[in-house]
Image: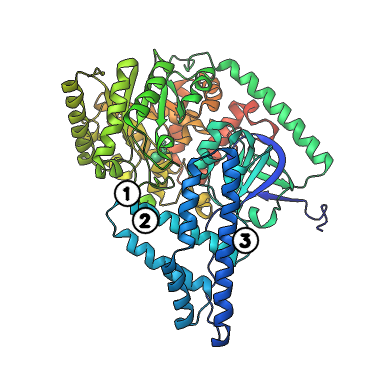
């Protein structure tokens, strides 16, 4: 038995989603296991083969158990997949090949199985047939289960999460997150990931506190441990004593009070004292978030991420399903507009139906518009859904990850073909629907002047623009310290994009997380942005700051920041200035955006 007192610890990570929550840990064994590689003596070969067979039997037993439970819970679509996994566990080739490798190369079973799976993956990659390619994921999933059994690691069925727990995982993909019954999840903490990983963004939009990048959470936290998540400071306290728990409950009360106070700004326009008006948009990914966006004072949807519609399912969303969703968005936000971003998969969001999740470097791979252009039929289905919904409200189309003019033209061509199809079929849509480009790749920023003549608006995606400009993986906590929105290069870039857009007479907005940080508001205002779009929760506070500032002081602050040479100097200077101007937003030692 561990001494509870000695296990009382504080872990520091990255504040991914604000809020304070106290609850019991639920460990989820996600993320790949490390495969040990050992040579073995000839005398150990048969023992190693036995170990392999035992792990296979154990895996089968676990799957059958899960299957029984799923039957009871009537989640039928899992049923089919579990049968496929059981079939793989019976696959003679998988078993015989692994045994053969153990015998001939005299290596441990984990290593042997890893070699066999590696070969299978390569073979799968060459298969054209979509259905067969999909089986690759199943084989890998089963292999992970065998590895875990060999190495004595646990498994978790995400749909099983019950109670009001804090999910502790090495990593969570957005697909993992949405598999859970989120009503039972009070918080998320992960070893890896950062503030702008898609899971962090999803947590924020769902209002679930989260801390990422804790590095050692899954090794030091045990299932059932009492945890406090401080999603403002990015800390996790393990097994706190009574006094600390009380302190946090009190802190939560105070912050909730301040949040309620700031909500009073929700209904007011985002206008500076000297009359500069900024449009406040909401970033959402579920229709269900619309009421939340409106309650927080959104004047439109600045970014509707459509990925959720596609993730974590066997089939693809039909045109009808998409039309229905986008129509709900259009009608729900009317008379304001909603920007529907076309599919942005890849990076840390994989579409399991297509076998593209084996890329060595997915952030630089077949992501977003590149994927849509490679799969034009799939792209057209989405465009048809958006166009048809545009007859029911004001929608705009946004293409993600544009790197050059050719991609915009190609996308617009496919859009035109889709429009012609609808005209031929007599289906109504908004013929003047606006088309925008996300500016989130440095190449697009450098040619913003030319790109501005190809589209109706720009939306700057700072999450990716920072990632690609500063060459830091947005989900890698080891380099998250370099994720510097106020880096001089980023400021120059954003300013250049805004100026280029304005010279061409188009509107320029920001929909990256940077827009929601109170410390950045005046700097962004000083650039002359037309729209700021963010997680709904942050809108009232941004309005509050804007309404108590002037455009003139914002431009001055930007000019002063321009005089400084390093990101750290700029950040220190801007935060100091903002804390002086808005002391109540820095109460309790917190920045409300989560930075301690
Ligand atoms: C961005 O990159 O800033 C953005 C808004 O898009 P996403 O976070 O979905 O990549
Ligand atoms: Mg992006």
| Left or right: 444, with 196 as reference point | left
Q: Comparing marks 1 and 3, which lies closer to the viewer?
A: 3
**Distance from mark 1 CB to nearest ligand 2 atom below 8 Å:** no
- Which of marks 3 and 2 precedes in the sequence? 3
Q: Name the element at disc 3.
A: loop
Q: Where is mark 1, residue-wise? A: 366
Q: Is residue 228 left or right of residue 528?
A: right
Residue 270 in percent (x, y) is at: 48, 18
Q: Which residue is mark 3?
A: 153
Disc 2 target residue: 359
In space, the residues marked 2 and 1 are separated at their CA atoms by 8 Å
- Mark 1 vs 3, N-terminal side: 3
Q: CA distance from mark 2 to mark 3?
A: 26 Å
Contact, CB < 8 Å: mark 2 with mark 1?
yes
**Residue nearest the observer in this picture, 151 or 400:** 151
Nearer-the-camera pick, 281 or 167: 167
Mark 1 vs mark 3, CA separation in Å: 33 Å
Residue 552: quarter of image = top left
């Amino acid at each position: 038995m561990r001494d509870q007192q000695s296990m009382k610890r504080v872990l520091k990570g990255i504040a991914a989603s604000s809020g304070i929550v106290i609850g019991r840990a639920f460990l989820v064994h996600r993320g790949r296991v490390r495969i040990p590689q050992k040579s073995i003596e000839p005398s150990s070969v048969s023992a190693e083969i036995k170990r392999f067979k035992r792990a296979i039997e154990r895996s089968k037993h676990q799957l059958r158990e899960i299957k029984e439970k799923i039957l009871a819970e009537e989640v039928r679509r899992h049923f089919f997949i579990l049968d496929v996994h059981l079939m793989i566990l019976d696959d003679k080739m998988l078993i015989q090949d692994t045994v053969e490798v153990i015998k001939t190369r005299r290596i441990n079973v984990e290593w042997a199985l890893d070699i066999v799976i590696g070969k299978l993956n390569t073979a799968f990659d060459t298969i054209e047939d979509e259905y067969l390619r999909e089986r690759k994921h199943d084989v890998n999933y089963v292999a992970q289960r065998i590895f875990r059994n060999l190495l004595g690691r646990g498994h978790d069925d995400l749909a099983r999460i019950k109670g009001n727990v804090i999910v502790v995982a090495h990593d969570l993909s957005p697909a993992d997150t949405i598999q859970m019954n989120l009503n039972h999840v009070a918080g998320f903490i992960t070893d890896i990931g950062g503030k702008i990983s898609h899971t962090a963004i999803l947590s924020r939009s769902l209002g679930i506190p989260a801390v990422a990048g804790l590095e050692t959470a899954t090794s030091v936290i045990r299932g059932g441990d009492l945890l406090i998540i401080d999603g403002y400071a990015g800390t996790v306290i393990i097994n706190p004593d009574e006094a600390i728990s009380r302190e946090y409950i009190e802190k939560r009360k105070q912050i909730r009070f301040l949040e309620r106070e700031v909500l009073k700004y929700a209904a007011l326009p985002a206008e500076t004292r000297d009359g500069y008006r900024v449009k406040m948009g909401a970033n959402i990914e579920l229709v269900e978030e619309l009421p939340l966006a409106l309650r927080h004072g959104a004047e439109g949807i600045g970014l509707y991420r459509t990925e959720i519609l596609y993730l974590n399912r066997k089939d693809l969303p039909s045109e009808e399903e998409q039309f229905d969703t986008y129509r709900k968005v259009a009608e729900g936000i009317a008379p304001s507009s909603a920007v529907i971003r076309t599919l942005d998969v890849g990076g840390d969001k994989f579409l399991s139906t297509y076998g593209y999740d084996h890329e060595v470097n997915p952030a630089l791979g077949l992501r977003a518009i590149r994927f849509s252009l490679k799969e034009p039929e799939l792209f057209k289905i989405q465009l048809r859904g958006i166009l048809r919904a545009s007859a029911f409200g004001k929608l705009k189309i946004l293409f993600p990850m544009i790197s050059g003019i050719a991609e915009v033209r190609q996308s617009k061509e496919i859009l035109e073909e889709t429009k012609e199809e609808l005209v031929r079929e007599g289906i109504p849509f908004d013929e003047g629907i606006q088309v925008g480009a996300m500016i989130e790749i440095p190449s697009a920023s450098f040619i913003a002047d030319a790109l501005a003549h190809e589209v109706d608006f720009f939306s700057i995606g700072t999450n990716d623009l920072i990632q690609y400009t500063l060459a830091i993986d947005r989900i890698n906590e080891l380099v998250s310290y370099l994720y510097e929105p106020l880096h001089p290069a980023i400021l120059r870039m954003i300013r250049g994009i805004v100026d280029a857009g304005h010279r061409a007479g188009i509107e320029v907005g920001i929909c990256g997380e940077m827009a929601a940080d109170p410390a950045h508001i005046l700097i962004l205002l000083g650039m002359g942005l037309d729209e700021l779009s963010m997680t709904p929760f942050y809108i009232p506070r941004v309005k509050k700051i804007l309404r108590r500032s002037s455009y003139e002081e914002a431009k001055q602050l930007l000019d002063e920041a321009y005089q400084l040479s390093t990101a750290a100097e700029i950040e220190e200077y801007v935060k100091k200035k903002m804390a002086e101007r808005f002391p109540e937003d820095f109460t309790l030692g917190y920045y409300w955006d989560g930075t301690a």
